Image (tube, helix red, strand yellow):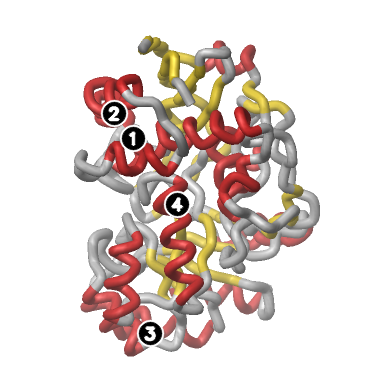
Amino acid sequence: MKIKQVILRHLKMDLLHPFTTSLGTETDRDFILAEIQNEDGLSGWAESVACADPFYKEETVKTNWHIMEDFLIPLLLQQDIKHPDDVSDLFAHIRGNYMAKAALEGAVWDLYAREQDISLATALGGIKTQIEVGLSIGIQDTADDVLRKIELGLHEGYKRIKIKIKPGWDIDITRAVRKEFPSIPLMVDANSAYTLDDLDHLSQLDEFNLMMIEQPLAHDDLIDHADLQSRMHTPICLDESIHSAEDVRKAIKLGSTKIINIKIGRVGGLTEAKKIHDLCQAHNMPVWCGGMLESGIGRAHNIAITTLANFTLPGDTAASSKYWLKDIVQPEITVDNGIINVPDKAGIGYEPDWEQINLLTLEKKVYVR
């Protein structure tokens, strides 16, 4: 694989509805779209999931652009890549900056699959032709608003419901959901909003028969989560704390978690995501694919990784129409009764919508070999 050029685009897309978590409210999505072309003019695509602000993780759109432009892209343009796994090794000496690395590595994976004329799912070793997906519901103004969104999601067939929680919006809202929907697959996501001082409070969640509570404690913690898990029946799922298979190894050893949320951007790319998947599978620990309000490009990568065997829980890859008036891929990603049919076309299986991409692009820069 000889890379001829890398193209970065800074896009901004307005969300159909504000999305609120314990970290704040998003009304739009700033992100970097990465395109990598080979000498034959074939392109691979991926996106950086870094946010405009450093609230979820320390990376931002601006820091990602800097790291890609000044460090990662020069490395890519100096090398001939035999396999996408080589990119992970190529970037290994640059610490952190997982989302920047994942964007470029993901574009290489897409380009590789297109060159081989196979789907990205096949290139990754996926075995599923369909994947189950769930719906993530942000913090709302009222409990009735949450219940209405859940009812709509269930009517549309989503296989699991996730609600965001934070101090003051947790036990009562979960109780209200369980009263209205006593048997649905339900989980809560705290986005690091609590500490061990809240142990007795969080333990009340055990009464609701939840699938899991996602990342209740600090974004970089493994030890306190182990303490909390030892005192709760509800499985803890780690998200922000996990950047690598090595983090997962430590979490398993400490007893910090029973489930892992794999986000491609958070762990530095598809190669590391596969390693985490394989390690969890060896320890009989289920995994699922989280979402970062991606455009269709990022969602396509999530679909592909979810075809691996140990993704046994529904992920967050809802339909494009849940978030965007118009997505940047053709066809848009659709969900039928909680199921996404995995595309079998070469690469990610979706094509860029050039009219929409050009309309939404704020900045573009080309880097040539």
Name which of mark 1 and mark 3 comes first in the sequence: 1
Q: Nearer the viewer, mark 4 or mark 2?
A: 2
Label 4 crowd (10 A; few <14 / some 14-19 / many >=20): many
- In this rendering, would 310 be left or right of 258? right
Q: Which label number is shown at residue 72?
A: 2
Q: Nearer the viewer, mark 2 or mark 1?
A: 2
Q: Label 4 belongs to which residue? A: 263
Say which of marks 3 and 4 sits in front: 4
Residue bearing the label numbered 1: 100
Q: Secondary structure at mark 2?
A: helix
Residue at the image position 23 percent from the left and 76 percent from the top? 224
Q: Amino acid at mark 2?
A: Leu
Residue drawn 67% across the image and 38% down it: 118
First in sequence: mark 2 vs mark 3: 2
Give the amino acid at mark 4. Lys
Mark 4 lies on a secondary structure that is: loop
Residue 9 position in % (x across, y down): 43, 18
**Residues at marks 3 and 4 touching, judged by CB atoms closer than 8 Å:** no
* 161 relative to 97, above or below: below
Residue 166: x %, y % from top left: 37, 63
- Spatial distance from mark 2 to mark 1, Cα to Cα? 8 Å
Residue at 56% x, 17% y is: 357
Q: Secondary structure at mark 1?
A: helix
